Amino acid sequence: MIRKSIKYLILVLINLIILTGLLAYWTDFVELTFNSLVRPIEFLKIIGFTLLSLIGIRIAIGFFRKWKTSIKKRIQISALITIIISSFLYFNYSKKIYENRFLKRDLRKELAEKIEPANGLTHGTKANNLTFEQYQEITRIKWFPKLQENAESISYYYTYDGFLPDYSFDLSYNLPINIDIDLTEFKYGEIIVDTIGNIKRITYSEYVE
């Protein structure tokens, strides 16, 4: 029984390896920095889709026996079932690869060069002099408050404990003096505004202990 099933198991295993490779490729430094659980969570999805593929193939085997399908045809149909079931992951991972490794390659590379470890709690990072586009890329992954497009010279400092909810978050950026501050995202912390010439320096601090 195992010998008869080995070809299907190999097929599913190859699919698992390909998906795992795609996962490892699209999760670059920026993604892993701000979403440290992305790989284990996505790998669990891959395992789940792999199990669904095995179930789909197992159901198909019953029809193979009934219709006396050739081995070649069985493999082709099993491969098609596996690809169809895993198509969501293939589409999602391919999209992420295009965005992270090609479309935004330079942006994410420049952002990665500015990110440094932050001292404080157990984990954390910091970065200085970010552009709006670089900071916006972080907010696509992390919960950091979004800023208005006029924001410049953006810096952040973020440390967190890990198992405990404790964290410390500081954000500062410049705005032209004639631009009103959008306070929509600043709900849980303290805001300080300093005026230097024709520039407003906004500092936002948020702490949870």
Image (spheres, rainbow, N blue to C red):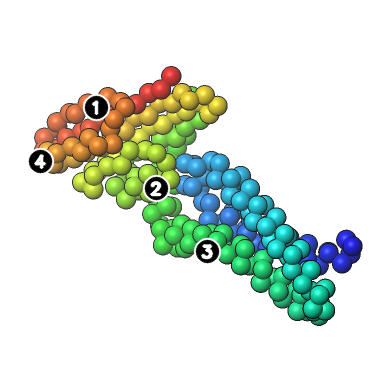
Q: CA distance from mark 2 to mark 4?
A: 28 Å
Please identify the quadrant where the C terminus is shown.
Answer: top left
Circle 4/circle 1 CB separation < 8 Å: no
**Among the two numbered marks 1 and 3 on one chain, the one whose residue lies closer to the N terminus:** 3
**Among the two numbered marks 3 and 2 on one chain, the one whose residue lies closer to the N terminus:** 3
Q: Which mark is residue 178?
A: 4
Q: Which mark is residue 191?
A: 1
Question: Would residue 48 appear left or right of 67 to someone viewing this image?
Answer: left
Q: Amino acid at mark 3?
A: Phe
Kindly tell me whether residue 101 is visible in this rendering.
Answer: no
- Find numbered disc 4 in the image and state the secondary structure of the residue it sits on: loop
Please identify the quadrant where the N terminus is shown.
Answer: bottom right
Q: CA distance from mark 1 to mark 3?
A: 42 Å
**Disc 2 target residue:** 140
Name the residue rendered at 47%, 32% in the picture: 124
Is residue 127 positioned above or below 110 on the image?
above
Q: Which mark is residue 91?
A: 3
Q: Amino acid at mark 2?
A: Arg
**Among the two numbered marks 3 and 4 on one chain, the one whose residue lies closer to the N terminus:** 3
Question: Would residue 149 appear left or right of 155 to someone viewing this image?
Answer: left
Q: Amino acid at mark 4?
A: Asn
Horizontal and vertical percent for residue 97? 50, 60
Q: Residues within 10 Å of mark 4 (few under 14, many from 20)?
A: few
Q: Residues within 10 Å of mark 2 (few under 14, many from 20)?
A: few
- Find numbered disc 2 in the image and state the secondary structure of the residue it sits on: loop
Name the residue rendered at 43%, 52% in the picture: 109
**Among the two numbered marks 2 and 1 on one chain, the one whose residue lies closer to the N terminus:** 2
- Find numbered disc 1 in the image and state the secondary structure of the residue it sits on: strand
